[in-house]
Image (cartoon, rainbow, N blue to C red):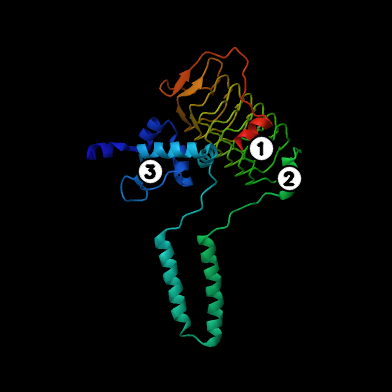
Amino acid sequence: MEHQQRKAWATARHAREELGISERTLARWRGSGLLKPGKHWRRKFPTPNSPVLYHLPSCEEAMGEATARSADLLERAVVPTRPHRHRSPCLRSLKMKQAGRVINAKRQMPAKAKSLVGLLATWALLLFVGDLFPSPVQAFEAKDLERVLKGGDCPGCDLSGADLFTRNLANINLSGANLSRAKLSFANLKSGNLSRADLSDAELAFSFLFETNLTQANLSQANLNGAYLHKANLEGAILAGADLSRGHLFDANLKGADLKKATMEETNLSGANLERSNLDQASFSETIYDATTRFPSGFKIIPSAFTIVQPKTETYDPPDRTNARLAEIH
């Protein structure tokens, strides 16, 4: 029994293979609270930088419960907003001790000095409380959001951090817009213009970007897990550190794109053009390509990380992203 219990705990790499999801997705689920410490995961050793172990049966149970409870819950867990910074308990204790010394020193000072120290102490306390409980950042312009939700063009507008989950934004001109940290999972951006837009850290999981113009767009650290990028134009785009796992990039133009440290596990690159792109330290696993895929000059395909398929001859039938389908997702 003890031997079986030990085998139930697996490393991130083993858990990825057993559960069929990427290590980055497992980390997101930990951050979102879907996987709880002690029950679903723990550290191998009692140190902060120790490798994470996952309890496979509990993780499978959590995934099943979340799916049964609400498919939306699982998808939101996959694409959570950026977590607040956690402060070390030791650092908090040190700050409290310093505050205690200030109070003791105040008791031995004259009235005027006490008043000055009191003001300083209040100011320091406000900074300390604000550091412990940072307020959420919501920088987007309400008028810009209203215009986009009505289907209007909004080049250069500020939609940073805006919640556009499942929204229909097809054919809209958002060139040069600030969409950093925006929640665009399952959104329909078909044939839109997002050239030079800032989509850094944006949540674009399973978004629909069919024939979308993303030339020179900043998609660094963006989550594009499962996104549909068929015939999308990403020439010169920045995708450094982006997650393109299970993405559909049939015939996509990635010429000159920066894909440094990008994750492309199970990504379909059939017919994609990656000439002059930067694939330094990019992660590949079961990545799909065909004879028409064009890689950068000198790029060596590792057979164990890539799967070659026959070029598609039939017309690609994109998934349904009509308003009726979006209503079903809600």
Q: Indicate the quadrant where residue 182 lies.
A: top right
CA separation in Å, label 3 and label 1: 33 Å
Which of marks 2 and 3 precedes in the sequence? 3
Q: For the residues marked 3 and 2, what is the alpha-carbon distance in whole angstroms? A: 41 Å
Looking at the rendered structure, which numbered label has been put on residue 294?
none
In this figure, which residue is indicated by the disc labeled 3? Answer: 40
Q: Give the residue displayed 46% in from the left and 55% down from the top.
A: 86
Q: Secondary structure at mark 1?
A: loop
Drawn side of residue 223 relative to residue 141, left or right: left
Q: Which residue is disc 1 drawn over?
A: 167
| Amino acid type, label 1 | Arg
- The structure residue drawn at horizontal position 62% and vertical position 23%, both measured from the top left corner, is 318
Q: Earlier in the sequence, mark 3 or mark 1?
A: 3
Indicate the amino acid at tag 3.
His
Determine whether the residue tagged by mark 3 lies in a helix, strand or loop: loop
Q: Which residue is mark 2?
A: 146
Q: 311 or 18: which is nearer to us?
A: 18
The answer to whether any part of residue 216 appears in the image is: no
Q: Amino acid at mark 2?
A: Glu
Could you classify mark 2 by the number of other residues whose Cα lies within 10 Å: few (under 14), some (14-19), or many (20 or more)? few
Residue occupying the point 60% across, 44% down? 181
Q: Is residue 200 visible?
A: yes
Dot 3: within a 10 Å radius of its alpha carbon, few (fewer than 14), some, or many (20 or more) residues?
many
Residue 179 left/right relative to 122: right
